[in-house]
Amino acid sequence: MIKYEIHGGNELNGEIHISGAKNAAIAIIPAAVLVDGICRIENVPKIKDVTLQLEILCDMGASVRLINEHTIELDCRRLYTTKAPYDLCRKIRASYYLIGSLLGRYKHAEVALPGGCNFGVRPIDQHVKGFETLGATVEIKNGFINADAGNGLVGTNVYLDIVSVGATMNIMLAAVLAEGQTIIENAAKEPHIVDLANFLNSMGASVSGAGTDVIKIKGVKRLSGGTYSIIPDQIEAGTYMAAVAAAGGEVLIKNVIPKHLECITAKLSEMGAETVFFDDAVLVRRHMPLQKANIKTMTYPGFPTDMQPQFTAVLCFAKGASIVTESVWDNRYKYVDELKRMGASITVDGRTAIVDGKGSLNGAPVKACDLRAGAAMVIAGLAADGVTDVEDIYHIERGYEDIVDKLRAVGADIRRVEVPDTEVMREAN
Ligand code: EPU
């Protein structure tokens, strides 16, 4: 077992470089299936979810050349199957993007029902509705989603009943090579949706309106290869900004798109942290006591649900009651019990959490329940008194590149520690 051991209390000072966006990369990699050529993709984050997406494609016959640490050349021209490997797909939510891209390119897809973080029910009815509206038949059988469009896909209007990031991107993927025009209405507007559209357009697609709630896709005959660089990760940047707010200090966060961080900086200023924007960097400093604040998660450009656990952790270090409202996921507060081990006083009622901030937390052994919950534990540990051990860190490493090294470089006392199996057994008994 590997855990993070954090000795809390150090201020953070220095610079952190942000990696490519996870949620863009894990859609752009399967999108390469649509491309009749080599895709050179730059700024690819070195994270487990990306490795898994590449493993899935290699298993199906794609070839990947590593050009340097963050650049790959991906060639999906010789896939020998439209059935994605069950065991790998189950491990990652974003394997569902293979349905859209395989269906778009080969008119057929068999992909295992996806895995990913557990926030309660995670339906994919809007994806299915989109594929069916374009002319596919979709059935779920033996743990696989089978999608077939024997007569081809034909562009049409798709109205999403719920604003869904995944459904918006999946329908875009299916529609790019369809006959005629597809219009997605009530589309999600997240930065990674714009990034996927830009990737597809750079390969020859005709997608317009990404970043608004109406996306138009004019079907083209073929996508050819090209080079594309993934945007910086909004949530990774926000996570380090939250860490500085909790631990104090002054950190320049480099390689960011400031526009994507506005909702996060607005909240940080309310909480007493200062931010200064540069062209592609943001300076975060916090020397004054933290203030309580209320947070409500929303789709972009609102406050991101993927920052909710990290900010709840920060609010434990403010004095007074803060109200956090989660409006995207049914059940994204599982980590609260872990924060309570550190002395947090938080009451959860449905989608609302009331954080009764005491100004401090105490180190404790805690678990990462999922990716962002794990990041929240790290933040709590950095600012807590004493030692925090974070277990189940595989969740964190699915989505954060070199988190330990990046934090150590700004003064955090955090180490990745291997715990001998005998010790784990003793604790379990
Ligand atoms: N929903 C439906 N039906 C659908 C699809 C979604 O009812 O067919 C509901 C969901 O249950 C949820 C809401 O719509 O209540 C939004 O879900 P969405 O489809 O937007 O989420 P997702 O595409 O499954 C992505 C990110 C999540 C992030 C959400 C919201 C990926 C792989 N995942 O999930 O990221 O929380 O968008 O922004 O891109 C993370 O990075 O930690 C993470 C969980």
Image (cartoon, rainbow, N blue to C red):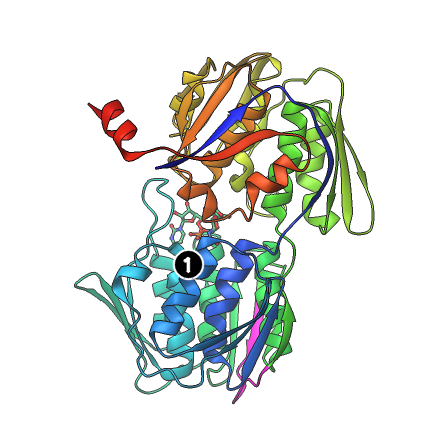
Quadrant location of the N terminus in the rendered image: top left
- Residue extending farthest bottom: 221
SS state under label 1: helix
Magenta extent: 215-225
- Can you give x and y, in whole percent of width and height, for residue 217 in the image? 55, 75
The rendered magenta stretch, by its main secondary structure, is classed as loop
Q: Is residue 109 above or below residue 383?
A: below
Q: Could you tell whether 269 is left or right of 323 in the image?
A: right
In the rendered image, which residue does mark 1 sit on?
Answer: 94
Task: Tell me the crowding category of disc 1: few under 14, some 14 to 19, or many 20 or more residues within 10 angstroms, Cα based.
Answer: many
Nearer to us in this view, 189 or 37: 37
- Residue at 35% of width from left, 56% of height from top? 124
- Can you give x and y, in whole percent of width and height, for residue 185 in the image? 52, 62
- Can you give x and y, in whole percent of width and height, for residue 134 in the image? 40, 75
Look at the numbered disc 1 and say if its residue's Cβ is closer than 8 Å to ligand 1. yes
Residue 341 found in image quarter? top left
- Residue at 49% of width from left, 68% of height from top? 29
Q: Is residue 157 visible?
A: no
